[in-house]
Amino acid sequence: MAFFEVRDMMIRFGGLIANEDVDLAAEEGQIVGLIGPNGAGKSTLFNAISGLIEPVRGKVLLEGENILPLLPYERAGRGIGRTFQNVRLFPSISVFENLLVAYHTRMRGGLLANVFRLPRARSDERRARGRAEEVMEIVDLHPYAQRRASELSYGTLRMAELACLLMLTPRMILLDEPASGIAQKETEALGPLLRRIRDRLGATILLIEHDMPLVMSLSDVVYCLDLGRVIASGPPAEVQRNPRVIEAYLGRRAAEQLEAALAAAAGGGSASAAGHRSGKGSRTGGRRD
Ligand SMILES: Nc1ncnc2c1ncn2[C@@H]1O[C@H](COP(=O)(O)OP(=O)(O)OP(=O)(O)O)[C@@H](O)[C@H]1O
Ligand SMILES: [Mg+2]
């Protein structure tokens, strides 16, 4: 039994099928990459896992238990944590305060205990501050602790958002394009950071990412979605070479040209290399803008 599994997932928006027959598995402590062209259904799958949308059918198993009947906050309580494609922080308070807010959303003391400064609320407060210190160290955010979120660069904002997620000690972390919109240097730091999070928290990570060098170098296993279906899965080096994956990203014509060029470069290849492959009709490339 895998630590985390998606089974037979189907998601519809009216007539549009956003996920169909999606199966995916992650062993504890793995980093699993989820790639695929724009509109493939990757974020939609995250929405279904975290409870923001309800699938038509399927299961999401965490240590064998189907968590789909649970409400979003209950799933978070079981250790499912996610970030969104766009940053969601409170802009006018500091990074440190944002971390405390993230923690208090699940604090057991409750509002009344807080208002009356009951002992449990005070100990929760201490725990929250301690946790914030620890998380800022993992994500290297100490220099920004007292800065308002609105003053941060986009890259640092994304790190702060990730730190908020870690406040909840997630066991299964869903990251939706953490490298999008951040500078090259920050992207380079992201790989070691995600490994550090995995190692320090013993977390399992499901990573949606368009930055191929990043996702391929980090992932133990990669799944590629296209038009809502898993078209390839396996070790990164295999998925990267898979003709269906190349075609999904580049469009069929470009994939054929690439294959022909690779065959020619390998010596004696001809431009017909891709002609034997059956495939779907020509479609425009799914490449990231
Ligand atoms: N709430 C919604 N209502 C209707 N259609 C939606 C909704 N959310 C997503 N879709 C559609 O579902 C399909 C999958 O979208 P999704 O956002 O999951 O793609 P993605 O793989 O995350 O793409 P990207 O790489 O661009 O983020 C798209 O056709 C999208 O337009
Ligand atoms: Mg998306």
Image (tube, rainbow, N blue to C red):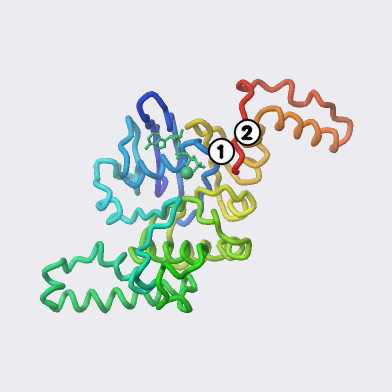
Q: Provide the residue designation for mark 2.
A: 285
Quadrant housing the N terminus: top left
Q: CA distance from mark 2 to mark 1?
A: 8 Å
Q: Which mark is residue 37?
A: 1
How many residues crowd mark 2 within 10 Å: few (<14), some (14–19), many (20+)? some
Establish whether ligand 1 lies closer than 8 Å to the Cβ of label 1: yes
Res 251 → quadrant: top right
Q: Earlier in the sequence, mark 2 or mark 1?
A: 1
Ligand 1 is within 8 Å of the C-beta of the residue at disc 2? no
Q: Position of residue 231 (x, y in %)?
A: 55, 32
- 91 to the left or right of 198: left
Helix, strand or loop at mark 1: loop
In percent of width and height, residue 226 lies at 53, 33
Vertical arrangement, residue 251 with respect to residue 127, above or below = above
Q: State the residue in front, 250 or 81.
A: 250
Q: Percent position (x, y) of residue 246?
A: 66, 36
Q: Name the one closer to the observer, 270 or 114.
A: 114
> Residue 22 falls in which quadrant of the image?
top left
Residue at horizontal 60 percent and vertical 43 percent from the top: 289
Q: Residue at x 29, y 67 (%)?
A: 101
At horizontal 56% and vertical 51% (from top left) the residue drawn is 220
Task: Reply above or below: 224 against 137.
Answer: above
Above or below — where is 164 with respect to 223?
below
* Amino acid bearing label 1: Pro
Q: Nearer the viewer, residue 151 or 53?
A: 151
